[in-house]
Image: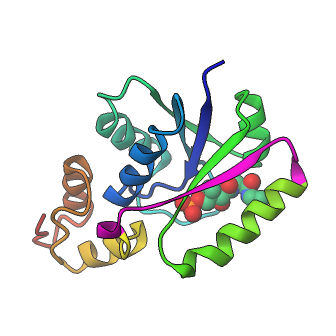
Amino acid sequence: MPSTAVYPGSFDPITNGHLSILNRGLEVFDKIIVSILNNPQKKSLFTVEERLEMLKEVLSGKTNVEVDTFDGLLVDYAQGRNCNVILRGIRAMSDFEYEFQMALMNRRLNRDIQSIFLMTDYKWFYISSTIIKEAASFGGDISGLVPEVVCRRLKEKFGHIPLRC
Ligand code: PNS
């Protein structure tokens, strides 16, 4: 049976750091389902539909990647997709505490599902969707940190600011 992992996240928006994890994950798994959490309570810059569009555009060339959305518990979603692996990325130590907590809770909720962590490439160690949005909102240069479509969409969002990317 081909091995499949779910790569969940907010992806608000997808960055080159996410892509690095995904590409590394594809060296380990036959297929990866990239799934966006649909959580109306969480404040986001892009709607789930916009994030889905961006993911689809960025990942269109990859046949072994599926893009999806989910709500509710991640472990329930993964099980519903017949998938027993959750893939997450780790950057610096600061990610560890949150990821550790989430992995332990997910394990308590469903012992059949394993969390697997991959490290992002050192080039993306300092970037996150949040810091990209902050830089972009003030017109900072974010070239080379996000895929082209994300750059375009950020320019549209912060239309009043001359964004360099
Ligand atoms: O990109 P993010 O925001 O760090 O992703 C966090 C995400 C979506 C993986 C996490 O918030 C999640 O899985 N939410 C769904 C609810 C859930 O199952 N939470 C974990 C156990 S309570």
Q: Position of residue 135 (x, y in %)?
A: 27, 78
Q: Residue at x 52, y 29 (%)?
A: 31
Q: Is residue 113 magenta?
A: yes
Evaluate whether residue 72 shows in this view: no
Q: Residue at x 87, y 47 (%)?
A: 110
Q: Nearer the viewer, residue 156 or 140?
A: 140
Counting the numbered discs, the total is: 0
Q: Position of residue 65 (x, y in %)?
A: 45, 30
Q: Residue at x 82, y 62 (%)?
A: 105
Q: Position of residue 147 (x, y in %)?
A: 24, 51
Q: Is residue 123 magenta?
A: yes
For residue 11, side relative to residue 162 (left or right): right
The magenta-colored residue range is 109-124
For ligand 1, the image quadrant comes to: bottom right
The quadrant of the image that shows the C terminus is bottom left
104 in relation to 139, above or below? above
Residue at the extreme top of the image, as rendered = 1
